[in-house]
Amino acid sequence: MSKVLVIGCGGVASVAIHKCCQVSEVFTELCIASRTKSKCAKLAAELAPKTSTKITTAQVDADDVRQLIDLITAYKPELVMNIALPYQDLTIMDACLACGVNYMDTANYEPEDTDDPSWRAVYEKRCKEAGFSAYFDYSWQWAYRKKFEEAGLTALLGCGFDPGVTQAYCAHAKKHEFDSIDTIDILDCNGGDHGCAFATNFNPEVNLREVSAPGSYWEDGHWVEIPPMSVKREYDFDQVGHKDMYLLHHEEIESLALTIPEAKRIRFFMTFGQSYLDHMRCLENVGMLSTSPVDFEGQQIVPIKFLKALLPDPASLGPRTKGKTNIGCIFTGKKDGQDKTYYIYNVCDHQECYKEVGSQAISYTTGVPAMCGALMLLTGKWNKPGVYTVEEFDPDPFLAALDKYGLPRSESRTPALVD
């Protein structure tokens, strides 16, 4: 039925590809492409005996628009799934426009070089106008709206879990549970234990930038920015237990503030253990989280890239990670004139994920929604020209697909609220 090009072959991409191969009636042909073709070939060989999906592989530098265009032109896919790094969102979008192909990704654009003068000028202007200073935001990709509309193409942004599923949860709450939503708290709990002194559960560069940035939230029509990790709460998560969580800036807040304009407050919290925070602060204090090159023995190195080389590969954590994740959204608002609370969430088991696809739950909870989002586009359930985030589409078929393919929802109508 469909030919799909997947760019990326890391932990999340591997999960998404595994899941695509479980739905061979839709994903009839897949091409897996990355800088390291041998990784693609290894995964293809592993999956070939288990699926009727025809799998091919290719080498591509996703920073090079010309290489991307050549690959897309040769393969002729109906959809490009960008499951590489957010640094490459714009080059892949450019290639999709040039070739007339639909696009999707799992995280919004951020630059690899935060010292680039041209990017820096736009960034500093946005900080003043918008009121938050995170390096990642939707503005760069939203600028492509008219181009995709005129080309008759769809670009689906941020179709992982958070962002992604959390936005579908918000669309579900708006459609089925509330007449008006007052507050949204997005809670991301990883109760897993990998036994390492310090490791990140996804790409260290992206993860550590996100965590070390100032926190921010939406309240009464504007952004409120706070020092990094300065707001801490404790929550009792279903099947995980009591965990400390911290308020972070997160991309879905930016889109939800526009698509659910009546919301008076939108916040995002993520759980962290004390050991993780101690390690991160130490690394930050000595400059290891810097993205600016430094001279070392006559060579220019980027500290955070060097740190990435030292840390465990997140894809290697699967066999040793035990425990569960719990990610969801708590809402307050009104229904039929009455105050109402509602909590929708998913619990995912690290070891069960590893048994199924050889991955820990962090990659699983991002890779499964990526496949389900692609499924929505390929089957025409989500199909309108332009650039969209997940909550701008009908949540019902997407959540039904998540229920079916490994991330079933749970609900509570009497949740404990976060103060």
Image: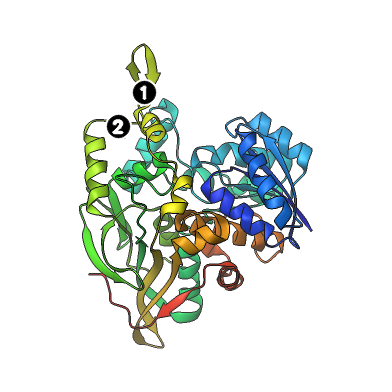
In the image shown, does 165 or 102 lie closer to the viewer?
Answer: 165
From this view, report whether residue 387 is shown above or below residue 93.
below
Count of marks, rendered view? 2
Point 51% across, 58% down: residue:
354
From this view, report whether residue 372 is shown above or below residue 302.
below
- Counting residues from the start of the chain, the first of labels 2 and 1 encountered is 2
Point 31% across, 44% down: residue:
198
From this view, report whether residue 1 is shown above or below residue 75.
below
Q: Amino acid at mark 2?
A: Met
Q: Position of residue 219 (x, y in %)?
A: 29, 61
Q: Position of residue 243 (x, y in %)?
A: 26, 64
Q: Position of residue 42 (x, y in %)?
A: 64, 42
From this view, report whether residue 146 is shown above or below residue 67.
below
Instruction: Report the coloring of the rendering.
Output: rainbow
The answer, for residue 384, to whether it is visible in the render is no
Q: Position of residue 260 (x, y in %)?
A: 43, 66
Assign a secondary structure to mark 1.
loop
Q: Is residue 198 left or right of residue 67?
A: left
Tell me which corner region of the image, top left, top right, bottom left or bottom right, holds residue 207: top left
Tell me which corner region of the image, top left, top right, bottom left or bottom right, holds residue 203: top left
Point 50% across, 67% down: residue:
168
Point 51% across, 41% down: residue:
85
- Assign the C terminus to one quadrant of the image: bottom left
Q: Is residue 192 left or right of residue 102?
A: left
Query: For the view shown, which residue lies furthest in the top direction?
Result: 298
- Assign the N terminus to one quadrant of the image: bottom right
Residue under circle 2? 288
In the image shown, does 164 or 49 lie closer to the viewer?
Answer: 49
Residue under circle 1? 293
Mark 1 and mark 2 in contact (Cβ < 8 Å)? Answer: no
| CA separation in Å, label 2 and label 1 | 11 Å
Tell me which corner region of the image, top left, top right, bottom left or bottom right, holds residue 62: top right
